[in-house]
Image: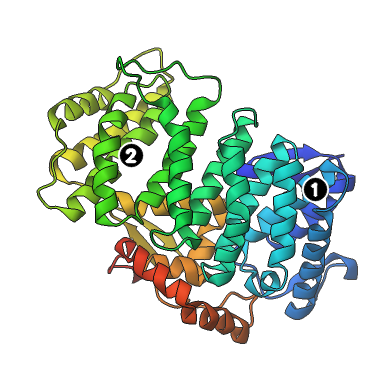
Amino acid sequence: SGIKVSGRNGVKGESGASDDELASDVLSHYSSASESASVVDEATGGEPVDEQTAQEETEDKLKQCIDNLMDKSAKTRLAALDSLGGAFSSKLLYDFLIERRLTVSDCLERSLRKGGGEEQAAAATVCAQLCVQLGGGDEGEEGFKILRPVLSAIMIDGCASVSARQSCARALGMCCYVSAAEDGEDLVKSMSHLESVFTMSYPNREGTLPTPNAGAPGLHSAALHAWALLVTLCPASRLNVLLDLHLPKLQACLESSDVNYRIAVGETIALLVELGRDIDREFEFEDSDTLCECLKGQATDGNKHRAKNDRRKQRTIFREVLHYIENEDFSEEKIRFGVEGIYIDSWMRRRVYDAFKEVLESGVRHHLQYNPLLRDIFGLGPPLILDSSVKSSKISRFEKHLFNSAAFKARTKLRNKVRDKRADVM
């Protein structure tokens, strides 16, 4: 009988036991964000083993996964990518990865260059998770410089699989957000490559929207969301240019035939208007009456040809966008984790939180609790409680290294627009 392993995008898949036992095994060590101190060791007949033994066993399994990334069998490589993805999303592995980051980067680059579509998609997701694990210091930047060209190349390759291109777009956005320097070459190039993908959905000179190919709206949505994440890093001078160029075209895309792409466009318009108002309190979108009429249409869309859930989701989000454009109202949301919480009270914070959630899936709360990178981005300060799998000396080593890194300090300054003074403890 097959063993269930966690697939990409949170989808569970059935697969043969032989290659995937390892994936299942590694994930069993990461089954819960709030693991108890004693991990049960099946080999000893279910008797508890101490933390250090459990940690060593887990690291041995992760080492095996890294070895398996070089296996000749595509199935074995895919199982290894899946199990690494599960581990990276649900634990902090900085100490383990810092010594192996170049090996892992090389393996991921090989999977991206030579693997099939499914392997490329999985490898791109693990690239994004690796950048989050390395925490935006010099090592993350070094890894991103290796991986950016290949992520971009697959994303803009019309012959590559759509799922691989979509995954590369997401990874490019996240890796660049975490690791690129302000106004650096990597940020400019990444944004330009993402634009080359989603602007394919823009209307032609006659104002007609192109008919999308199969899978294109999902790819355009991923590229637009990744680009919107990077827009939050742009200085005012660059933002003004982007607003003038993209807002009118995005407004036309609100008539797209794909509901999820329309939603991505609506959210991006709200974010751009918010960033415009941050620079200039008097910022006005030149054709705001037409925009509001269009948003009202989406917010009250009763088209029976659309699925009920799609209509409901579209109406909810477009009501929020409309309220923000008209009155600067934002439906605040509180994300709780452990004894803490963060407020999502702006379109920028929502885009940043959603981007981390896309990459870390259910592990996002664990990273908000323990990962100094996310805690810095959301203004939470040092972790309140130490992760049971990380000795206090080790986590302080990670923090010391991260917070003393010049690159990290520069990026903190760059991202501090996203901070919220009301991050709180409940």
Q: Nearer the viewer, residue 103 or 84?
A: 103
Q: Quadrant of residue 349?
A: bottom left
Q: Nearer the viewer, residue 182 or 119?
A: 182
- Which residue is painted at 16% across and 37% down in the image? 285
User: Is 213 situated above or below 291?
Assistant: above
In x, y percent, where is residue 62? 77, 63
Q: CA distance from mark 1 to mark 2?
A: 36 Å
Identified by mark 2, the residue type is: Glu
Secondary structure of the residue carrying numbered label 1: helix
Q: Residues within 10 Å of mark 1 (few under 14, many from 20)?
A: many
Identified by mark 1, the residue type is: Arg
Q: Quadrant of residue 33?
A: bottom right
Left or right? Give the position of 364 relative to 255. Answer: right
> Which dot marks residue 252?
none
Left or right? Give the position of 377 relative to 274. Answer: right
In x, y percent, where is residue 72? 88, 46
Secondary structure of the residue carrying numbered label 2: helix
- Which residue is painted at 37% across and 28% down in the image? 262
Q: Nearer the viewer, residue 362 or 246?
A: 246
- Which residue is painted at 72% across and 44% down in the image? 113
* Residue at the spot of label 2: 267
In the rendered image, which quarter contains the N terminus? top right
View extreme (left): residue = 282
* Residue at the spot of label 1: 77
In x, y percent, where is residue 136? 51, 67
- Which residue is painted at 17% across and 46% down in the image? 328
In the rendered image, which quarter contains the C terminus? bottom left
Q: Decide which of tag 1 and tag 2 comes sooner along the chain.
A: 1
Q: Can residue 330 be seen by looking at this rendering?
A: no
Q: Are marks 1 and 2 in contact (CB under 8 Å)?
A: no
View extreme (front): residue = 185
In x, y percent, where is residue 37? 67, 75
